[in-house]
Amino acid sequence: MDDKNHLHTAVDELNRIVHQSSDEVNTAKSLLSLCYQLLVGNGIIPFDASHGSGFDDYLKHSEIWDTNAINEFYDYIMACNTMTVGDLITLYKSLFRAVYGAKSALEMISLKGLSEKQLLLIETLGSTGKYEQADIYQTFNDTCLSRNLVDKMPTDGHCLYHMNKLIQGGFIKQEKVAHPLKSQYAVYSLTKKGRAVFQHVFDREPVEPMFMKIIREHDNLEHGLGVRTLYDFLRQSSEFYWVSCDRKETTLTLLSGETYIPDVVAKSHVPNRRELLTTIFEYELNTHTQENFEKKMERFLQAFRAEKNSVKCIYIVTNNRENALGLSRKVDTWVAKRGQMALMSVKVRITTLVCIREAVQKKNPISSSENWIVSYDFQKGVRPKIIKPTISFNQKKSAK
């Protein structure tokens, strides 16, 4: 059953309740008040909003504020018909028009004080699901120009002004998130109030913010943003023919029948061979326990056995040098348990996103050992080669 059928079923049920009542008008008002109280509870309508048309006087009756009646209405109408908040908004507006023959408070307060450009920002987030400031600004600026809302391409400061107004008004939520390469990073999404405005103005539900998919696939946004950044850098490298961080595309089936989903998988051409060579990358923040880290390393080895045309190197990328060295200590512990002989056919390399970015910018092969802070070659021994950090002239001078 689609969303429209859910709503129609709820409307039919409310009509049945009203028509069976001996006082249809008051029954309809009672149902309207229950819709209103649920919307207040969800933060869509302010508690002190002015409704006019007699509804303000009706809400003054203390007996209508009945928690049991609200819960029963929710269970019987909303939960039973799996209605969304958007459905409830539509139901409320329709009931209000039917009872009072006027626009509801929701329709009057939704657009109050919002400029055309602020509505465009709400439209941008609700239509695209974009969440990064730069992407939102670019879409906003391009649309302003194409719709003749401005005479020339606006600056990012123009969008920032309207964004801050909407954040202050409770229409857009700004959430600060740790990003591996960007300071003061935040993601943006519509609040319940903003979603209600979008649903009212554009007569459809807003799309889900794209960062929600990242959270579902990577447990948390910080790790997911690191994976996406690594993917973006690898995609820019001419070394690889194909790169993906899409779980549907990166899922590998092991010889045991189990599945393994690396963070990023890249494929490259091999001279004089038809098959593509597979390279596996993991983005780690050094938050795993030693036991879980070792399980991940074993997954790597199982993947190498299952993927005959894979690079037999465990590539681990992290957010900073400190974590790279911390991950190296975990590798040392794993190697001590595994033994050098069992690992003679594989290598392990650990580096940071900054090193990967520099390799891409300099057009160096990602696989080159100079890009990796820690490198293990078990044919030469168990002690890793560790590249010391580069110190610039200014750093040396200040250290004296």
Image (tube, rainbow, N blue to C red):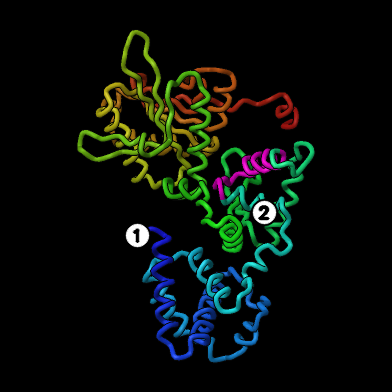
Comes first in the chain, label 1 or label 2: 1
The alpha-carbon separation of the residues under discs 1 and 2 comes to: 32 Å
Residue 363 shown left or right of residue 335 in the figure? right
Quarter of the picture containing the C terminus is top right
Foreground residue, 278 or 117?
A: 117
Kind of residue at disc 1: Met
Question: Going 59% across and 28% down the picture, which residue do you hit?
Answer: 389
Residue 370 image offset from top left, x and y in percent: 51, 20
Disc 2: which residue: 119
Residue 173 shown left or right of residue 207 in the figure? right
**Disc 2 on helix, strand or loop?**
helix
Magenta part of the protein: which range? Answer: 127-145
Q: Residue furthest right?
A: 151
Q: Residue furthest top?
A: 272
Q: Is residue 379 magenta?
A: no
**Disc 1 on helix, strand or loop?**
loop
Predominant secondary structure, magenta span: helix
Would you place residue 230 above or below residue 131 in this image?
A: above
Nearer the observer: mark 1 or 2; the answer is 1
Q: Quadrant of residue 110?
A: bottom right
Q: Is residue 139 magenta?
A: yes
Quarter of the picture containing the N terminus is bottom left
Disc 1: which residue: 1
Would you place residue 62 above or below residue 226 in this image?
A: below
Residue 225 image offset from top left, x and y in percent: 52, 42
Residue 199 image offset from top left, x and y in percent: 56, 59
Residue 54 image offset from top left, x and y in percent: 64, 84
Q: Quadrant of residue 305?
A: top left
How packed mark 2 is, by other alpha carbons closer than 10 Å (few <14, some 14-19, many 20 or more), is: some
Question: Going 26% across and 35% down the picture, which residue do you hit?
Answer: 253
Kind of residue at disc 2: Leu
